[in-house]
Amino acid sequence: MTSDPTYLHSTPQNFYELVWAERQKFVQSLIDNGEKSAYRIINKLARHERNFTLSLERANYRYDQPEDGIEEVKIFTGHAEWVPVSHGDAVELLPTGLPVATKNSFLGNQLMVPAYADISSIAANWIVDLVDADCAAIVELGCGYGRNLFNIHNLGGPRDIPYYGAEYTDSGKSLTALLTSLENTIDVRVEHFDHSAPDLNFLGQEAEILIFTCHSIEQVELIPSTYFADLAQLDKKVTCIHFEPFGFQVAADNPYSVRQKKDFSARKWNSNFFEVLGLAAEAGVINLSHVYKDIIPNHEVSPTSVAIWRNF
């Protein structure tokens, strides 16, 4: 075990509060051993996570309520450890220890993805190609530890503009800031953002911005009905692209979408992204130009769908 007890309710937000903190310990160990490049550190962390996954200890906590008697809630104890990824006995492995291929889904069909296929770079490359010459800032809402922003920059994204890493968790912001402190080639500005109460007042005077989310809204059970209006009503030209697993909300018309719907319902993950998006488009709040269902392979029950809109 690698951390002292920190009792937190078992929620998606608290899960990430703890895992970003554990990742920061790993990152700090790399820095202490001489690593100085954020890009190298991010890649070394990704390599580590091909072989190990973070396990957070959970427990049931019982306590007395003055009027209601004994209550029981699920909590994180704060204990965490890196454990080897289990691929199962029936999976063929490469000499490196990774499976020859893994099951994903794509456009409603099963897809076998070979080892070392860099699916994580799809969103970054898409944004690099989408951003235009007049874009004055790139903003990720729910940036975690900023990996996507560094990837966009490293893959040829704009050089002399600010990259805003907006994140809900304190530990995510802390790790983003630590990585940012190592690089003078990218201007990352770490800010707070909550999908449940969207507020972009932290932005500067940029006239045109690109905003994106990547598997960030998925764990917010219900976004506000004004979510897209709050983003679109900025006094700026806004282009927004969402990489989110909302395919089942478009139509549960294949086995993977049906499983995705059941999985999200059981986890109490997002169920209204596409509805709120559609209502905003119908009201003329946003110009919704593209929706792609299950267009990016991911886990079998969580293929990534894409929506693109503008406020102009």
Image: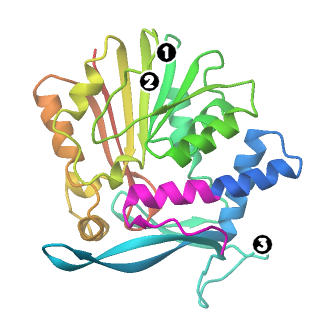
Outermost residue on the bottom side: it is 89
Question: Which amino acid does the dot numbered 3 rest on?
Answer: Thr
Residue behind mark 2: 210
Q: Quadrant of the C terminus?
A: top left
- Display colour scheme: rainbow
Q: Is residue 9 magenta?
A: yes
Determine which residue is flagged by label 3: 96
Q: Residues within 10 Å of mark 1 (few under 14, many from 20)?
A: some
> Mark 2 and mark 1 in contact (Cβ < 8 Å)?
yes
Q: Which residue is mark 1?
A: 135
User: Where does the image place residue 228, in percent across and percent down from the top left?
Assistant: 24, 31
Between the C-alphas of marks 3 and 1, the distance is 41 Å
232 vs 266: above or below:
above
Indicate the position of residue 50 as horizontal and vertical percent values. 66, 65
User: Quick one: label 3 or label 1, which is nearer the N terminus?
Assistant: 3
Picture quadrant where residue 208 is located:
top left
Mark nearer the viewer, 2 or 3: 2
State which region is magenta: 1-22
- Which circle's residue, 1 or 2, is located before the other in the chain? 1
Q: Quadrant of residue 149?
A: top right
